[in-house]
Amino acid sequence: MTVQRDRFYIGGTWRTPASSAKISVISPNTEQVIGQVPDGDPSDIDAAVAAARAAFDDPSGWSHWAPAQRADAMDRLADALDKRVPDMVQAVSSQNGMPVAVSEKLEAVFPQLLLRYYAGMLREASFEETRPGLLGGSTLVGRAPIGVVGAIVPWNFPQALAAFKYAPGLAAGCTFVIKPSPETVFDSYVLAEAIEEARIPAGVINIVPGGREVGAYLVEHPDIDKVAFTGSTGAGRSIAEACGRLLRPVTLELGGKSAAIILDDANLDLAAIGEQLFGATLLNNGQTCYLGTRVLAPKSRYQEIVDVFTALAGSLQVGDSLDPQTQIGPMASARQRERVESYIAKGIGDGARVTVGGGRPEGLDRGWFVQPTIFADVDNRSAIAQEEIFGPVLSLIPYEGDDDAIRIANDSAYGLGGSVWTGDHDRGVEVARRVKSGTIGINNYLPDPTAPFGGVKASGLGRELGPEALSAYLETKSIYL
Ligand code: NAD
């Protein structure tokens, strides 16, 4: 696959970029250049924000359309994306190493699911209500779109995470400038073509791929009304500082180091739960923010749990992300593999025990592959248990009793996801309630579009998905009658 693009999708047309700089995309499978797109420059962001502003301010435009009219347009966009599923799968998996088996289920279909969900909500929603006043009279409470949104997304789930933002935001009547990560740009062109085919009005969604400087420029742009960011905690902090200074609303979906708590009554038969366990701990080569990468194991069943995870990781098929049989693809970049390998070295240096993996897979001499790796006997205070590795590396930490498990789970700077594995549903829910995180699953982990998703502590601010996300793109106004 070789992709060559020379324009940006801005203001409903294909616009020539301000500079001749290019982003070269390198295949994580082969380490070969597989395409080039223009690299965004601040003046491209200016043009995109101006287009989004004009679309938002148009008195007969998108933000003033009847809800049903916007909902119809969102359904058309979902239909246009449906037609492009194979292109989206190829685009995503060729760039970031996500196995096609994952991109087919998530990246290439989740956006449509969200567009249709929020379109449905929009048809039912009411944006004004009159409330009787406590002091007499009444108040007309209106909810209006917040304005122009700067949406910044990472490379690990580039399309799903963009849709987490634009699906509720479009329903609310906002307009968007999306800045994809330089590692994943081809998929944003597939999205732009779908937007064009769906006849979404000019300027409602504009897309400018580029690096962190361009992202920072977008965050601070005077004509942006809200920032929606998914990415690392470090970048999230600097965006939060800028938004704090500007008093600009911001949602931050950041890193994680969640706990998968195995209770002593869990069913550990891999034939029964292997797929769920894999989805909750290793999905997308371990490059998923919410994964339970700290596995908390009761001392009474510790060896059995070590054996189960060793067998799971050892059985996974590692290979080219475009091969449908692949379960673990390459790391998204050379830098990402270096990071993962340096954590593996740190874990060994800190005295943890590798039970499987720990190196590069045999026979794959090209591509940024690492073996799925299990560490046993990990101290929860060590670097591999406290810091986000973002690769197929799990730390098994022993505990004694449910209270101890919850204490260890909460002994983390992060609080995004997690899971509880048990034969007793009520006990699982009780433990889940006590874990400090924005989301958590019982015997599985699968984000549900109808429920708010996001983190506490260093995992972020605000929530995406569910009706809560629609509210996050609306501003209220009270008119006292
Ligand atoms: P990153 O923070 O390096 O980059 C994310 C995006 O932000 C990219 O588009 C990048 O160009 C841009 N960016 C970076 N610094 C910026 C700045 N100062 N101002 C504006 N934009 C900036 O993250 P990444 O390596 O691309 O993604 C991996 C990280 O994302 C992991 O930490 C992962 O946990 C996190 N993540 C979180 C969620 C979630 O929902 N909580 C989901 C997926 C990924």
Image: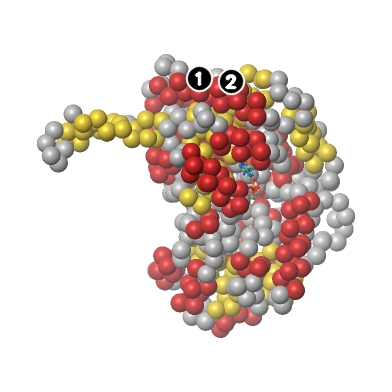
**Element under disc 1:** helix
Give the Cα separation between the discs numbered 1 and 2.
9 Å
Would you say residue 157 is visible in this rendering? yes
Looking at the picture, tell me which residue is in the foreground, 42 or 354.
42
Residue pushed farthest top? 60
Give above or below for 467 relative to 350.
above
Q: Circle 1 sits on which residue? A: 54
Q: Measured from the top left, where is residue 357 in percent x and y?
A: 76, 67
Q: Measured from the top left, where is residue 199 in percent x and y?
A: 55, 20
* Residue shown at 59% from the left, 69% from the top: 295
Based on the displayed image, in which of its 4 quarters is residue 96 positioned? top right
Looking at the picture, tell me which residue is in the foreground, 430 or 255.
255
Residue pushed farthest left? 136
Would you say residue 269 is visible in this rendering? no
Task: Evaluate if marks 1 and 2 touch, with contact meaning CB atoms under 8 Å apart.
Answer: yes
Based on the displayed image, in which of its 4 quarters is residue 71 positioned? top left
Q: Measured from the top left, where is residue 25 in percent x and y?
A: 77, 38
Q: Circle 2 sits on which residue? A: 11
